[in-house]
Image (cartoon, rainbow, N blue to C red):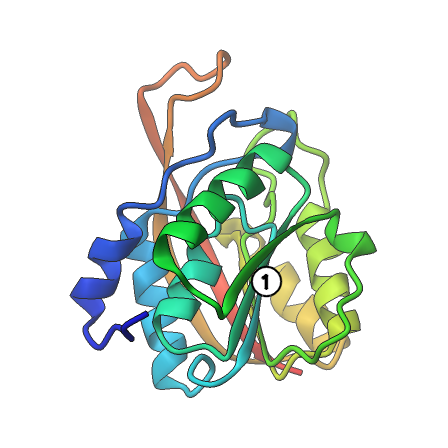
């Protein structure tokens, strides 16, 4: 698999990744847009967090961050998600790429205990934009990330929780080095949605462990 060398080419490749086949509201499944994923992974690559590293994509959905990392020269990119429908679709994409540095595992992240070292974690957990989603899911992901002890963590959160999260990260000895800010589009995919599209402000915290 040829390594991507231009950000625009990365975005174009990621545009071909399908969305969640059967989105489940209790998992708050919204696909990360290719423009956001490519920007974040390109920045991570520039920081030295991708090339020749072991990457985990927790709550990977159809695998956009794992796939992007594999395309950018990761030694190994592993996507983990509890939803079998999404994992099966991610594996189909992986098979088409012929990527021997890419794998997908169906598992609740709490039960995921890999035998290999992780260098970088990407995670886009349910961050509570919907009332039907159990609160505190993003904190569960942070705790799992700390357990896995990567060198670097990239984690999505609601922008409105920034002050709380910065204090939480500091209390847990996570050194936040960068904050990326995105306008995340939420399409009308669930019955209770009243608008065709809605945008929410999110942040991605890059933290050193």
Residue 98: x percent and y percent?
A: 39, 60
Q: Is residue 126 above or below residue 43?
A: above
Q: Position of residue 136 (x, y in %)?
A: 73, 46
Q: Quadrant of residue 180?
A: bottom left
Residue 142 shown left or right of residue 199 in the figure: right
- Number of marks: 1
Residue highlighted by disc 1: 163
Give neighbour class at mark 1: few <14, some 14-19, many 20+ (Cα, 10 Å): few
Name above or below for residue 164 compared with residue 83.
below
> Residue 209 placed where, x, y %?
67, 83
Q: Quadrant of residue 85?
A: top right
Q: Position of residue 116 (x, y in %)?
A: 71, 77
- Residue at horizontal 36%, vertical 57%? 97
Q: Quadrant of the N terminus?
A: bottom left
**Residue at (73, 48) in percent of width and height:** 107
Query: Depth check: 127 or 153 in front?
Result: 153
Task: Give whichever of 130, 9 is nearer the camera.
Answer: 9
| Nearer to us in this view, 161 or 85 | 85
Q: Secondary structure at mark 1?
A: helix
State the residue at coordinates (58%, 26%).
24
Q: Residue at x 19, y 73 (%)?
A: 6
The picture quadrant where one finds residue 12 is bottom left
Q: Is residue 55 above or below residue 60?
A: below
């Amino acid at each position: 698999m040829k390594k991507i060398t231009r950000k625009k080419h990365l975005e174009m490749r990621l545009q071909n990744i399908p969305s969640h086949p059967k989105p489940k509201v209790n998992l708050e499944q919204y696909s990360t847009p290719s423009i956001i994923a490519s920007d974040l992974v390109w920045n991570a690559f520039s920081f030295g967090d991708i090339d020749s590293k072991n990457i985990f994509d927790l709550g990977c959905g159809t695998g956009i961050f794992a796939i992007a990392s594999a395309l950018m020269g990761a030694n190994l990119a592993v996507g983990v998600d509890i939803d079998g429908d999404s994992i099966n679709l991610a594996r189909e994409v992986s098979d088409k790429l012929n990527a021997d540095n890419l794998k997908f595992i169906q598992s609740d992240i709490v039960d995921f205990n890999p035998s290999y070292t992780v260098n970088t974690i990407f995670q886009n957990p349910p961050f509570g934009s919907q009332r039907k989603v159990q609160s505190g899911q993003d904190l569960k992901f942070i705790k799992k990330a700390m357990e896995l002890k990567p060198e670097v963590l990239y984690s999505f959160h609601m922008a409105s929780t920034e002050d709380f999260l910065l204090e939480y990260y500091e209390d847990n000895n996570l050194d936040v080095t960068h904050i990326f800010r995105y306008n995340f589009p939420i399409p009308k995919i669930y019955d209770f949605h009243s608008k065709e599209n809605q945008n929410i402000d999110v942040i991605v915290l890059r933290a050193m462990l």
